[in-house]
Amino acid sequence: EVQLVESGGGLVQPGRSLKLSCAASGFTFSNYGMAWVRQAPTKGLEWVATISYDGSSTYYRDSVKGRFTISRDNAKSTLYLQMDSLRSEDTATYYCARHHYYSPYVMDAWGQGASVTVSS
Amino acid sequence: DIQMTQSPASLSASLGETVTIECRASEDIYNGLAWYQQKPGKSPQLLIYNANSLHTGVPSRFSGSGSGTQYSLKINSLQSEDVASYFCQQYYDYPPTFGAGTKLELK
């Protein structure tokens, strides 16, 4: 069974940093591109970042470019999101998601989410 | 970025009814469209990709159709477990973008 388990969320002040982790199991992690998708309270879904299966390529939405860094450790089957210079508008539940093997940017498995609140 | 407009924003339907949710893209997305279901308090789950391909394990009462800029999700014989929000997502163009969602409730 595919499982994605996020951790590392919490309350953080504006301008500070936070690092999310996503532990994957039930599939060959190193074969799949992975993504972070967020959802602000009572809002819709917003793609944040994607990393290729081997970590060689990364992609970000404009609003987080230069502040967030997506990375992975295939030996540990773990995905990361380093979030720096956090802003109030980054407040959201952050989901770790697996890219569909044949359809890039289709997310076919999701974690339960990690809540991030940016507030003073 | 390609804008995705979903309609309606919410709807109420009875058990056994057929429900249709629409999604319009701001430009042609060449069937690069997925549908997700998000039950209250849960994470999204993939239902449909490539506009009309049913994801593994998804009940056959769900179906997708459309082309160009207009797409739809149909739920036949509505069940109580279908109460959820539904989101469309285009992935034809970068960055991938989502619709605002449709909240489906039971009448």
Image (cartoon, rainbow, N blue to C red):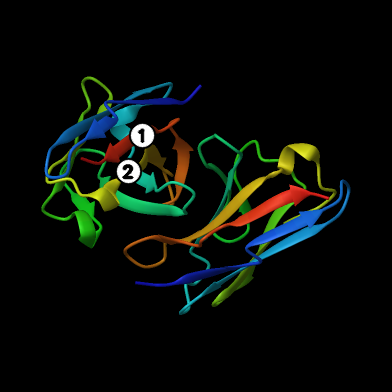
**Mark 1 closeness class: few <14, some 14–19, many ≥20 residues within 10 Å:** many
Which chain does tag 1 point to? A
Q: Is residue A83 above or below residue A66?
A: above
- Mark 2 and mark 1 lie on one chain; the one further toward the N terminus is 2
Q: Amino acid at mark 1?
A: Ser
In depth, the one of A73 and B97 nearer the eye is B97
Report the residue marked by disc 1.
A115
Give the structural element (helix, strand or loop) at label 2.
strand
Who's the residue at 44% across and 72% down the image?
B3
Q: Residue furthest front?
A: A120
Q: Quick check: can you spot residue B23?
A: yes
* B74 sits left or right of A25 in the view: right
Residue at the disc numbered 2? A35
Q: Secondary structure at mark 1?
A: strand
**The one of A12 and B101 positioned closer to us in this rendering:** A12
In the rendered image, which quarter contains the N terminus of chain B?
bottom left
